[in-house]
Image (tube, rainbow, N blue to C red):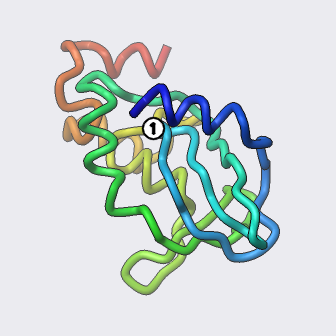
Amino acid sequence: MIERACLLATALAATPAIPHAATIEAIVSPTAMVVRADGAARLLSLPGKPVLYCGLERFLGWSAQLIGAQIEAGGAQGPEIVREGKSIPLASVFAGEGWLRPTELTEAAQEAMVERRGGWAVGSPGTELEFAL
């Protein structure tokens, strides 16, 4: 499955921004997903690094809930997804759930590290400190 997703990802052109409403079709990693916008499939990349200390399979299980979700272009923080009635930057969702290490430490990312959510759940002690250095 991972190999197929990688082949799909390389076959699609990377898209820095979403022009209109898009639908998440597949999630390859915490930093890459396939979205459909204006009838075309595109690879959407999020800034940061994946946090996969507990493995890609666990992440893919968690991220399955996002398949089919609508996302919008958003603002300066990138694409947004509507959750519980409000628009949230997609990168913040991934960081807050512990699957994405954003380029700048955010409160949501820090909480995920301290509470050992998502990919941080099985990281070795002190792993979080690597982020701050």
Of 94 and 45, nearer the camera is 45
In this figure, what is the number of numbered marks?
Answer: 1
**10 vs 107: above or below:** above
Amino acid of disc 1: Leu
Q: Position of residue 48 (x, y in %)?
A: 58, 33
**69 vs 89: above or below:** below
Q: Alpha-carbon neighbours of circle 1 within 10 Å: few (<14), some, or many (≥20)?
A: many
Image side of residue 118 versus residue 17, left or right = left
Q: Secondary structure at mark 1?
A: strand
Q: Which residue does the numbered mark 1 point to in the structure image? A: 100
Q: Residue at x 75, y 59 (%)?
A: 76
Q: Residue at x 72, y 68 (%)?
A: 37
Q: Residue at x 33, y 43 (%)?
A: 60
Q: Residue at x 78, y 56 (%)?
A: 17
Q: Position of residue 123 (x, y in %)?
A: 23, 20
Q: Position of residue 39 (x, y in %)?
A: 75, 70
Find residue 95 and report its image quarter.
top left
Q: Position of residue 132 (x, y in %)?
A: 46, 21
Q: Quadrant of the N terminus?
A: top left
Find residue 114 and report its image quarter.
top left
Of 56 and 6, nearer the camera is 6
**66 vs 10: above or below:** below
Of 52 and 108, nearer the camera is 52
Of 84 and 1, nearer the camera is 1
